Amino acid sequence: MNSASLEYTDRESLKAIQDERLINTVKRSYERVECFRLRMQEIGLIPDDIHGTEDLAKLPFSYKKDLRDYYPYGLFAEPMENVARVHASSGTTGKRIVVGYTKNDLEMWADCIARMMREVGVTEKDFVQVSFGYGLFTGGFGVHAGAEKIGATVIPISSGNTANQIQTMIDFGATVLCSTPSYAMYLAEEIERLGLKDQLKLRIGIFGAEPWSEEMRGKIERTLGIKAYDIYGLSEVMGPGVAGECRFQNGMHVWEDNFIPEIIDPDTGDVLPLGATGELVFTSLTKEAFPVIRYRTRDICSLIPEKCPCGRTHIRMHKPQGRSDDMLIIRGVNVFPSQIEEVLLKVSGKEITPNYQIILDRVNNTDTFDINVEMSDAFFADDIKSIEKTEKTITEGLRSTLGIGAKVHLVNPKSIVRSEGKAKRVIDNRQGKI
């Protein structure tokens, strides 16, 4: 059965494929990965106890901590002579997260991204500007290979140097832009400021690697004159392309012939029913160098079981609301930065831009919650009463959405540092304070 047919196979046939691949993955991981074998033995399981996806919940979870504990190659299931490439995280919060790929893994990765690109209309006639970072980060290389598999012309510019990004986009005739959504917003902002929109040939945007709201999607689409699509992935599972939207923009198709998704209660670990919101967990089915079993992503979302109008039978996942480890607890209330972004983008117009930064502190055992929001150039010359009115509108919107108050401060245009990768939205100074 070829890749294209697997996108549309009936659920019964898909389950048979998953069952066979899960049994093989568990057996290989047990034999070759010490961490997984010890976890299985701790709970009295052997590979013969797993007969298919109905036994998935019996298997132990795996965690990001495992990658640090077995750094760098201790979780690999293939000898290094079979590993064609390694990628890694930046390691800013500890040891790097190192993952590996065989040649077959790289081909599967390219195929997953090509499926998504093909469905949103990318063809061999397109010019795909890849503004994800290249290097140890997985983003650039994965999207690059998927575009090449389709036959499109790739412009591998990587991230950064925004003036050059825009000039290249115009000169080379880019029709597809791939980047983080926050960087796409930054590019859109600069293109609008410079009055260059009419010189663009862009028609499609593929954005991922960080949460973004529907309001942000709309803003990017209007400003760049494109259709913007979401792509999902993480290095530990593969990289971008584990799931991706189709032209209907109603949830991202998870390529279930390669990955099994689950939604669990992040506190208890119990599997939740389809449609419930919880933590996303993935098990890989075809990865050779670095298989993962029930990997806890910390992303909070839900699954959509209904068949998509595009005809694909693979389950869809909603855009993650945020990460359980990115969730802010402010005065006892759970807050995701994406909720704040949604409020700002509803207000965003001539007064403010969507650029913001959350600043948390603790004074006399009480959390302080400030949000700096950038004024637009057009609004900067306005009077203080207009500024106060806008701050009040945002404050009321935040209180209605979050259930708690925040101090909103309009700040000068371009005073919040722009991001050419993932945006840094939160400065939390509460550590160790009472």
Image: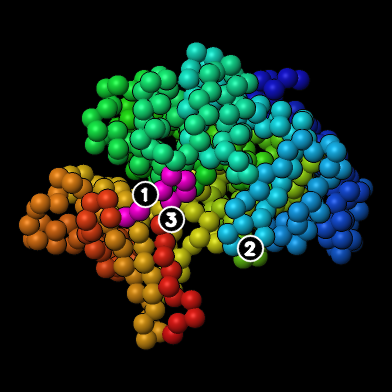
x 50%, y 40%: residue: 208
x 59%, y 19%: residue: 150
Q: How many marks?
A: 3
Q: Nearer the viewer, residue 410 or 91?
A: 91
User: Dot 2 surroundings within 10 Å: few (below 14), some, or many (20 or more)?
Assistant: few
Which residue is labeled 2 in the image? Answer: 94
x 44%, y 85%: residue: 434
Which residue is labeled 1 in the image? Answer: 418
User: Dot 1 surroundings within 10 Å: few (below 14), some, or many (20 or more)?
Assistant: some
* Main SS category, magenta section: loop
Mark yes or no: residue 26 visible.
Answer: no
Cβ–Cβ under 8 Å for marks 3 and 1 = no
Q: Mark 3 or 2 closer to N-term?
A: 2
Disc 2 residue type (three-letter): Gly
Q: Is residue 258 above or below residue 411?
A: above
User: Would you say residue 363 sits in the magenta stretch?
Assistant: no
Q: Which residues are magenta?
A: 416-423
Q: Mark 2 or 1 closer to N-term?
A: 2
Which residue is labeled 3 in the image? Answer: 424
Give the alpha-carbon distance from disc 2 to disc 1, as whole Å. Answer: 25 Å
Give the alpha-carbon distance from disc 3 to disc 1, as whole Å. Answer: 9 Å
Give the alpha-carbon distance from disc 3 to disc 2, as whole Å. Answer: 18 Å
| Residue 176 horizontal/vertical position (percent) | 45, 25
